[in-house]
Image: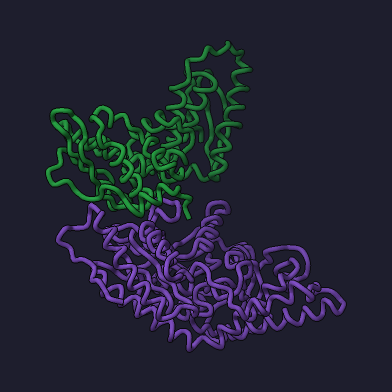
Amino acid sequence: MWDYTNSVLDHFTNPRNVGEIEDASAVGEVGSLACGDALKLFLKIDKQTGKIIDAKFKTFGCASAIASASALTEIVKGMTLDEALKISNEDIAKFLGGLPEQKMHCSVMGKEALEAAVANYKGEKAVAHQEEPPVCKCFWVTEKKIREVILEHQLTTVEQVTNYTKAGGGCGGCIPDIKRILAEVMHAQMPPAERPKMTNLQRIQLISQTIEKDVAPTLRADGGNIELVDIDGTLVKVRLRGACSGCAGAKATLQHLVQETLRQKVSPDLVVVEEN
Amino acid sequence: MPPRQVYLDNNATTQVAPEVLEAMLPFFKDLYGNPSSMHLFGGRVAQHVTQARERVAALLNAHPDEILFTSCGTESDNHAIKGVAEAFPEKRHLVTTKVEHPAVLNVCRYLAKHHGYRLTELPVDKRGNLDLDQVAAALTPDTALLSVMAANNETGTLFPIEKIGAIAREKGVTFHTDAVQAAGKLPLDLAKLPVDLLSISGHKLHAPKGIGVLYVRRGTRLMPFLHGGHQERGRRAGTENVPYIVGLGRACELARVELFEETNRLRQLRDRLEQGLLAAIPITHINGNPDWRLPNTSNLGFEYIEGEAILLHLSAAGIAASSGSACTSGSLEPSHVLMAMEVPFTYAHGSVRFSLSKYNTDQDIDYVLATLPGIVQKLRDMSPFYPKDAPRVVQTSA
C-alpha cells in the first residue's frame, strides 16, 4: 500500500471544493481516461482585483490525484493570477505533507490544470501538448515537456522523469529517448569547462575509459553491449551488440547517447559512428 | 473502526486455516529433526513429510513421487520453465500466453532476452479466451515448452488445459500449467489431465506463505533447480521446510474433502455479490468469461472512476479487494491481463477484483452490497467523464 500522509488521506476522503462552477471565468483541463488520471479545474476570477475568488474541480484518478486537486483549489483561492502561476507542483505536494515519489505526476497535473485555466482566461490557446509529436506515445509526453521537467527538478534518472511526467512508464519504448534527452540537458547545463590539453594517447584512453565506465554498464544492464573498434581523429568507431542492436531506431538513439556522453566527458568535436 | 472486516482478496493470499496451523506447531517444538537423519528424531519427522506428500498427491490424483516441494509458486514456475528448457538444449522456442502471472511471463521473457529463446506469447480474446487453433499452430518441433495457466488470477477465466494438454502431447511438446489459482478451487485429476508439470502455491489455499509444489509427471525431462543434497530425490536440494510441508499437506487434505461443497457455496456467494453489484451500480462490466470462471472470483469494471480510489474507500470501510488499475501497482499502465483482453480504458482503470474464500459469509456480501454503491457514486460525482444524465446507483436498503 502507498505510504500516504494523513493530509493526503484527509483530502482524498473529504475532498474540498468538488464540483463545477456554472459561470466559471476559466476552465483548465488536463489528462485523459487512457492516462488513468484527469483533472478539470474551474476558477472564478474577480475582474477588478484579478483575484481568484472561487475554485472547484472534478477529477478522475487515484487518491493522490484527488488529494492534489483538492489541495490546489485550497491553495489558489484568494490569490491573484500571477501569484497562482508561481505555484509549483512541489508547493502542492508540500501542502499535503509530501507525496510518494511515484505519485509526483499527480501534483504536476495540478500545476498543468492551473496553467491551462489561466491560459484559457487570458484567451490564449490552451497549452498545446499535441503540437509536436510526443516522445512517449503511451502518455503523450513531448520532448519539450521532458526537458522542462528535467531542468526544473534537476532530474538525473529515467525513473525520476517517469515519476514526474509518466513518460516511459507505459511500453517503455521511449526510454532510450529519455536517456538521450537527460544526457543532452545535463550536458547543456555543464559550464563549458576548460578542458586541459590532452595528448593523443590520453584522449584515446579517456574515450576508452568513458565507454567502459559510463556507457557500457547501462547497455549491459539491458542485455546489450558496446565495443570500441577504432579512433580516427575525431571519429570514434564503435560496434553495438546484443539486445540494443535489434532495430534501426534504437541504434540511432544509442549512437547519439554514446556521442553525447563522449562529447561531454572528452571533447565536444567527437563524432560516433557505428561499425559493422 | 469500520463496523466489519471483510476480506475479499483471496487470490492475493488466504488466511491460514486453524487446522493447518495446529498441524504445523509440533514441528516448531519437539519434532525438529532433519528428515534425512538416521535416528529417531529424523525418522519421526520423515513420516510426516511422507504423509504430507501423499495428501498433496491425493488432491491431484497423482503419485506421491510426482510431488516436489518448493518454496513458493514462483519457484515452481521458474523450476518448470528453466528446468525443461535446460533438459532440451537443442530446442530454442517457448510458448506461453499474454495473460500469465509474472512468475511465468517474466521467466519466459528472461530466457528470450538473455538466452536467445524464441518466445511466442499467445493473445486472448475480449473475454480472455485462447484460440486453440493458435495454440496448435504455435507448437513446432523446436518448441521446448508450452506453459498455459489453469485459471487466471485477475479475472478467474479458465483455460481448457485438458484440450491444450492434448494438443501439446500430440505435438510432442512438454506442457506446464500454473495452477496456483485453480488448485483447491477446482478438481484437478492428473490421472486424466494431459499435464506434465503443474505449479501450486500453499498460501492460496490456506497454508502459509513460503511453501509450494511442483508436480512433475513420471518420465518428464527436467533439470534440477537447486543443486546440493539429495533431498526431493535430487531434484530440489535443501533441507525440507518440514513445518510448512506438513501445513500444506493438511491444507490439501482439507481442500480435497471440502472441494465439492465449497465450490458450490462459493459460486453462490460470488454470484450474489456480482449480481447485487451489477443491479445496484449501472454502467458496470464483468471482466473475463462469466460462463467459464473460478467459482470465487469476480472482476468488475466500473466506468468513469479509478480503482485505487475505490480500494482506499473500501479499505476505510473495512473491505479488502484488489484492482488492475495502474495506480495500485506503481506501474503506469493498467494490468497486462486487462490490456491483453483489450478492456477499454473507460473501465480498465476502474476495475476491481473480488476473490472469496471459505471464510466469507452471507453477512460479508450484504455489507459489501450496502457499502460499495455509495462509494462508486461519490467517485463518479467527482469524475469529469461521468455524464450528468448518466444513470445513478440504486440505493439498496441492506
Which residue sits at x=44%, y=49%?
A6
Residue ID at (33%, 75%)? B274
Is A4 drawn above or below residue B282 in the view shown?
A: above
- Front-most of residues B18 and B99: B18
Which chain did the renderer colour purple? B
Q: Looking at the image, which is closer to me, B28 or A201?
A: B28
The spot of residue A272 in percent (x, y) is 48, 27
* Res. A34 visible in picture: yes
Which of B259 and A209 lies nearest the eye of the viewer?
B259
B73 vs A172, left or right, is right
Quarter assignment of residue B163 = bottom left
Indicate whether B203 appears above or below B325.
below
Can residue A131 be seen at all in this image of the molecule? no
- The quadrant in which residue A141 appears is top left
| Position of residue B374 in the picture relative to residue B48 (left or right) | left
Q: Pinpoint residue B26: horizontal percent, then vertical percent.
A: 74, 77
Q: Residue at x 21, y 66 (%)?
A: B392
In the image, B49 versus A76, the foreground residue is A76
Q: Which chain is green?
A: A
**Residue B162 in the image: above or below residue B382:** below
Most extreme residue toward the right, as rendered? B39
Q: Residue B166's spot in the image, x, y percent?
A: 49, 80
Residue A36 appears at what percent x and percent y?
A: 33, 52
